[in-house]
Image (tube, grey):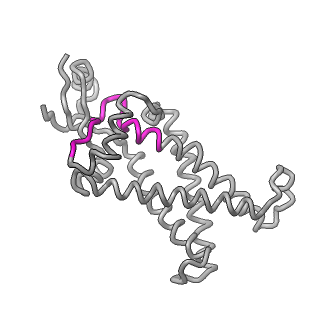
Amino acid sequence: MANHIVKLHVFKRFERLWHWSQMVLIFTLIFTGFRVHGMHEWIHFDTAVMLHTWAALILLLIWAFATFWLFTTGEWRHYMPTAKNFIQVARYYALGIFHGEHHPYIKTYRRKHNPLQALTYLLVKIVIFPAIWISGIAYLLISFGFKDLISGLGIDCTACIATVHTFAAIAIVMFVIAHVYLLTTGHSFIDHIKPMVTGYDDVELSDEELAYLRADEPNRIAEKIN
């Protein structure tokens, strides 16, 4: 059975819109969050709080739509981690990347994220995001005078809520730094971000998958490489 590397439409329009909107909003949250914590004074404190709140609410709405989209389209399967090639990919990021080695993973029709990416994205989505949203909403309700409601839910420590929110935010900042750093490795920066602009990326297909796409979804194929 031969495998073919094909330029395939991988990232849907909504997925790309979700990605770039999320990027803008997260950077807005980081910038305003630093201001709220007194790490800079580039904008007024009240403006930072307002922008932080609105950016958070818009991002929460986008994530709600994204979660619905992932489960209704079956795209959630791409985010499930697997042990296959995990060691090779982990070794590449730990050592091989510094020796100019080629990435050991090529996107496939059923899995567009490598095992380490899938595990990282899953942890971010089920651990870090819930932590920052639950703590953020609780903190917002307290600021609006609903402290009794929060206490009734068994959460009665404002300082604890703020601490959880801050640590989750730090984790997101670390994730963003690592994500941006990896865009500078291997291929050129443009090559890394181009798929999330055009939607097309190199994907490994079997004979059966290529035949299926040619017959049923020919518009997804941009060009056959080999």
Magenta span contains residue 150: no
* Horizontal relation, residue 1 to residue 121: left or right: left
Quarter of the figure with the N terminus: top left
* Horizontal relation, residue 66 to residue 221: left or right: right
Magenta span contains residue 107: yes
Quarter of the rendering containing residue 203? top left
Image point (35%, 42%), residue name: 11
* Horizontal relation, residue 19 to residue 45: left or right: left
Q: Is residue 55 above or below residue 118?
A: below
Quarter of the figure with the C terminus: top left
- Helix, strand or loop: magenta stretch: loop
Image point (22%, 25%), residue name: 214
Task: State the image coordinates of residue 111 (x, y, percent, origin top left).
Answer: 36, 32
* Horizontal relation, residue 121 to residue 192: left or right: right
Q: Is residue 69 above or below residue 210?
A: below
Q: Which residues are magenta?
A: 101-120
